[in-house]
């Protein structure tokens, strides 16, 4: 009986693992914009970010490295307006309205989403990226929506701009360079 139950659990887990990449999400930012996201084999299909480099960051309002990153992301968005999309999900418990006030006070010019408005998307990313909860945690997607970089911890400002340039140039040159995943703790 235990053996049969184990086989059943493994079979269901395998089926779920194969289908988990095809989930769709509707997350809502602090300006009440809906962002449609669908999982793909190599990353994410984000409806309003087609052809853009995407920074998906999980951060906290009490996290010193996260707070240090905010002005860098603002500068990145200002410089690359229509070429970069930044989606930041706050995971330290601010409500939607609290995050709205926080985003306004910090001058955030990119999508900020409270964990309550991200639904199960945070758990989906944790499972797919094997994220253990450390913040800041950033995934960088190329203009095709494929994950190119994963970083646990602060990404220095200079590196944010270098990664952006590299991925924008990759798209314009049609390079097929291998994916890099920088996993540091």
Image (tube, grey):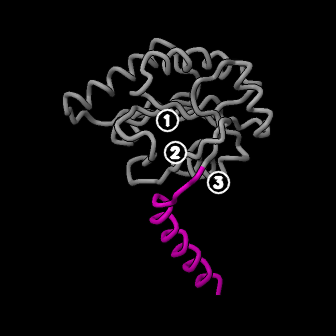
Numbered disc 2: secondary structure: helix
Label disc, if present, on residue 139 of the rendered structure: 1
Say which quadrant the N terminus sits in.
bottom right
What residue sits 48% from the left and 71% below the top?
15
Label 1 to label 2: alpha-carbon separation? 9 Å
What residue sits 59% from the left and 77% below the top?
6
What residue sits 72% from the left and 24% below the top?
63
- Please give the range of residues in magenta: 1-26
Label disc, if present, on residue 15 of the rendered structure: none
Q: Is residue 44 above or below residue 62?
A: below
Chief SS of the magenta region? helix
- Foreground residue among 21 and 152: 21
Label 3 to label 1: alpha-carbon separation? 17 Å
Q: Residue furthest bottom?
A: 1
Disc 2 to disc 3: CB gap under 8 Å = no
- Foreground residue among 16 and 80: 80
Disc 3 to disc 1: CB gap under 8 Å = no
Q: From the image, tell me which residue sits under label 2.
A: 129
Considering only order in the chain, which callout, 2 or 1, is on the residue closer to the N terminus?
2
Numbered disc 1: secondary structure: strand
Disc 1 to disc 2: CB gap under 8 Å = yes
Say which quadrant the C terminus sits in.
top right
Q: Position of residue 182 (x, y in %)?
A: 44, 30
What residue sits 62% from the left and 81% below the top?
5
Q: From the image, tell me which residue sits under label 3.
A: 120
Considering only order in the chain, which callout, 1 or 3, is on the residue closer to the N terminus?
3
Q: Position of residue 52 (x, y in %)?
A: 38, 33
């Amino acid at each position: 009986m235990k053996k049969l139950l184990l086989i059943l659990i493994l079979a269901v887990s395998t089926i779920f693992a194969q289908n988990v990449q095809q989930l769709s999400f509707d997350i809502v930012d602090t300006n009440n914009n809906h962002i449609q996201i669908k999982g793909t084999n190599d990353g994410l299909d984000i409806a309003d970010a087609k052809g853009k480099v995407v920074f998906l960051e999980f951060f906290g309002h009490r996290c010193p490295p996260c707070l240090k990153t905010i002005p860098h992301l603002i500068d990145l968005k200002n410089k690359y307006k229509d070429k970069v999309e930044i989606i930041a999900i706050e995971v330290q418990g601010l409500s939607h309205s609290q995050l709205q006030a926080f985003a306004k006070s910090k001058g955030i010019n990119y999508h900020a989403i409270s964990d309550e408005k991200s639904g199960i998307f945070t758990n989906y990313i944790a499972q797919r990226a094997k994220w253990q909860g450390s913040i800041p945690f950033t995934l960088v997607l190329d203009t095709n929506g494929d994950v190119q970089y994963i970083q646990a911890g602060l990404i220095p400002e200079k590196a944010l701009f270098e990664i952006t340039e590299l991925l924008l140039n990759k798209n314009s040159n049609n390079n097929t360079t291998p994916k890099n995943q920088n996993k540091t703790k």
